[in-house]
Amino acid sequence: MLKNVLAFAAVRDINDAVRWYKMLLGREPDTRPMQVLAEWKFEAGGWLQVNENMQLAGRSSITLVETDMSERMKMLTRAGFKPKSFVNGPAISIITITDPDGNQVVFAQGKDENHRSTM
């Protein structure tokens, strides 16, 4: 049985990408197991890997599960990130941005009838 998942974003320059994702996530990577790899661990156990890979750079899409979409939007605006789109639907809210390499980064918050996170 599958137990967890690892999200992956391919980038052109790992040092530039670490600076950008550090700003986006508000913290340093949890590990740097290789010179071309940085990893962030999340509360529920998932991981985001950012890897220098010229052949795949800009072709990744990652989804981050959010607990407070309005706070996330404020944080993005304060940090100067420009969302490509924002959808606030009855079942899910989604903010989409793009990293400097062109990778899609999606923040998603599922809702139940009380608008609590269900993802």
Image (cartoon, grey):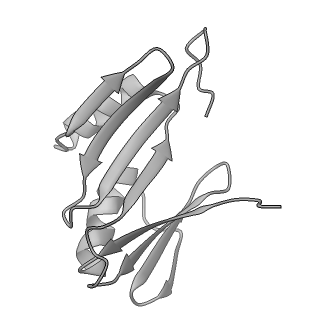
Q: Please, is residue 16 above or below residue 111 in the view?
A: below
- The mark tally for this picture is 0
Q: In this view, does 27 lie to the left or right of 104?
A: right
Which of 113 and 81 lies nearest the eye of the viewer?
113
Residue at 45% from the left image edge and 49% from the top image edge: 63
Question: Is residue 26 visible to the viewer in this orientation of the structure?
Answer: no
The x, y position of residue 105, in whole percent, is 34, 51
Q: In which quarter of the image is the N terminus?
A: bottom right
In this view of the protein, can residue 53 be seen by the observer? yes
Q: Residue 31 location, x and y as percent?
A: 53, 75
Question: In terms of image quadrants, where is residue 103?
Answer: bottom left
- Nearest the viewer among 91 and 39 is 91
Q: Closer to the camera, 62 or 46?
A: 62
Could you tell me which quadrant the C terminus lies in?
A: top right
Q: In this view, does 111 lie above or below 84?
A: above
Identify the residue at image location x=67%, y=49%.
44
Q: In which quarter of the image is residue 22?
A: bottom left
Most distant residue in the top direction: 114
With 58 as the anchor, is 88 left or right in this view?
Answer: right
Q: Where is residue 101 in the image (x, y as percent from the top left)?
A: 21, 67
Question: In the figure, 16 relative to 45: above or below?
Answer: below
Relative vertical location of residue 88 with respect to residue 8 in this rendering, above or below: above
Q: Which residue lies furthest to the right in this view?
A: 1
| Quarter of image, res 2 | bottom right
- Tell me residue 14's x, y (percent): 31, 79
